[in-house]
Amino acid sequence: MSPEAPTSRAPSLILVPAVITLAVTLLRLAGELQGWSPRFFSRAPGGGGALVGISWLVLVFGAWFGWKLGRSGDSPAGLGRALGITVLALVILPGLGFAASALKMDPHATGTFAVYVVGSILALAVGLQAWPALGRTLLAYAFAARVPVALLMLLAIFGDWGTHYDVPPFPEFPAMAPLLKWFYIGFLPQLTIWIAFTVVVGSLFGIPAGALARRGRASA
């Protein structure tokens, strides 16, 4: 089987995960609008660590994608190399945060935010090299998961819904027009930082799952 063949299955692989992710997003929105338990549906900036959310689905679906690709005959070129590249991608953003702190950059400044946006793009570019077939599948899933959130945030900000989708990330966030606010707290984070998070963290779980699936397939 050609190494590229499993990659062509990405749309079918991500369909059900994308639908589940959208359902969780809408459930989260309903819970916040209805004032359900903050433990599950927090309105706090960033989501407040609420249990109902889509971030943790990356772990599950990352492993699932890796397993399915491994069972179909694809696998990373080398387990150690793939994991090493993924870990490198994973430490880019914390590394940039440490550097920004050492340089005494204001964590709430636009320039600091730009550092994280650029860093996330770099982390994504690195992470995609670990296992390209898995990376492309996770990238497709990331956009399927995060584009609806970005659009939802646009509606929430213009409607002033009072959910975590439209709350500024910190109290000192400057007042600005709704569209510009969405650009800074919705569009940019969702389509850069969260895309990179999905690909890199998903790979961290998908690569071992794919290696196990390939080994099981070979011994069957």
Image (spheres, rainbow, N blue to C red):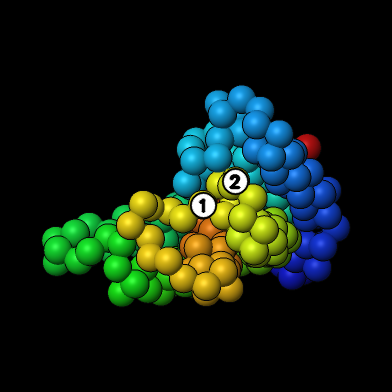
Give amino acid for label 1: Val
Disc number for residue 88: none
For the N terminus, the quadrant is: bottom right
Q: Secondary structure at mark 2?
A: loop
Left or right: 28, with 92 as reference point:
right
Q: CA distance from mark 2 to mark 1?
A: 6 Å
Can residue 131 be spotted in the picture?
A: no
Report the residue at 54% width, 58% height from top.
194
Q: Are circles 2 and 1 on residues that touch, CB within 8 Å?
A: yes
Which of 22 and 13 lies nearest the eye of the viewer? 22
Question: In the figure, is residue 42 to the left or right of 81?
Answer: right
Tag on residue 167?
1
x then y, percent, for residue 75: 64, 56
Badge 1: residue crowd in 10 Å (few <14, some 14–19, many ≥20): many
Three-letter amino acid code at the position of disc 2: Thr
Which image quadrant is residue 11 in?
bottom right
- Identify the residue at image location x=51%, y=52%: 167
Residue at 56% from the left image edge and 35% from the top image edge: 42
Q: Residue 115 location in percent, x, y? A: 34, 71
Question: In the picture provided, is 113 more to the left or to the right than 186?
Answer: left
Residue 162 at x, y = what percent? Answer: 59, 47
195 and 165: which one is in front? Answer: 165
Badge 2 is on which residue?
A: 163
